[in-house]
Amino acid sequence: MKKFNVAIDGPAGAGKSSISKAVAKKLGCIYVDTGAMYRACALYAIENNIPITAEGLQNELDNIKIRIKYAEDGQRIYLGDVDVSGRIRESDVSIGASDIAVIPAVRLKLVEMQRELAKTNNVVMDGRDIGTYVLPDAEVKIFLTASVDERARRRVLEMEQKGQTADFETVKKDMAYRDKNDSEREFAPLKQAEDAVLLDTTELTFDEVVTAVTDIIAKVLD
Ligand code: DC
């Protein structure tokens, strides 16, 4: 099969990561979760009491050692030698990631890693700016979305399945905060690329979304 990259963008909780993971498995390529990279940077700042501002981080970027490993169960992310794949999903890190993603120097560091991965592998990469900025020449671009209520409902369910308690209104408020922050930042905001296919998943099941995405990819790559 020829070399290809699939860019999947959309707001928090639209199902990008679970869909991208399933689609990458079907295609036999790697799934790159770029949100995890922003989350790992935010965790570094939180753990080291560094303010999440351009000034606070300017002399720290070289100290943030992010490594990605591909295991049977997908992408694992490391800060130095520590596997932080679980910790980065907690809500303080979610908010921190959205805040840190506003800082251009952080984005430039991570975008370089993302482009390198896409150059050397076939990837399904998800994020906010993949189709518009990171991989503008991706063969396939999909913008996944769903209503904020549905996205919050899914996130609550996911947290409850992990045994965590979740309050719908708090989850929805955090999501609305991130939507605004991610869409209104100046540099590489969350935005649908002009040549992306829009897929609203509000009324669709997980399997229906996987099928829809796989069909879009098959049409383009055939
Ligand atoms: O997809 P996620 O929820 O794991 O992403 C966490 C935060 O990282 C999100 O609120 C915005 C930021 N992000 C970004 O700005 N650009 C990306 N390509 C991926 C994530």
Image (spheres, grey):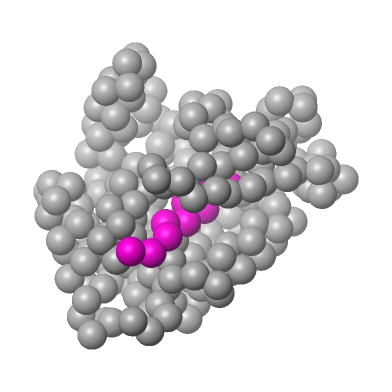
Does the image show residue 29? Answer: yes
- Residue at 25% from the left image edge and 45% from the top image edge: 147
Q: Is residue 9 left or right of residue 45?
A: left
Q: Is 102 situated above or below 129?
A: above
Q: Is 216 situated above or below 97?
A: below
Q: Is residue 169 left or right of residue 94?
A: left
Q: For the view shown, which residue lies furthest in the front direction?
A: 72
- Residue at 71% from the left image edge and 25% from the top image edge: 47
Front one among 18 and 11: 18
Q: Position of residue 45 (x, y in %)?
A: 72, 33
The quarter in which the N terminus is drawn is: bottom left
Name which quarter of the figure residue 111 lies in. bottom right
- Residue at 58% from the left image edge and 33% from the top image edge: 83
The magenta stretch is 28-37
Asked if residue 206 is among those painted magenta in the image, a careful observer would answer no
Name which quarter of the figure residue 198 lies in. bottom left
Front one among 8 and 68: 68
Q: For the view shown, which residue lies furthest in the right direction?
A: 59
- Residue at 51% from the left image edge and 42% from the top image edge: 76
Q: Is residue 163 left or right of residue 63?
A: left
Q: Is residue 94 left or right of residue 219?
A: right
Does the image show residue 98? Answer: no
Q: Position of residue 73 (x, y in %)?
A: 38, 42
Front one among 106 and 186: 106
Q: Position of residue 31 (x, y in %)?
A: 42, 57
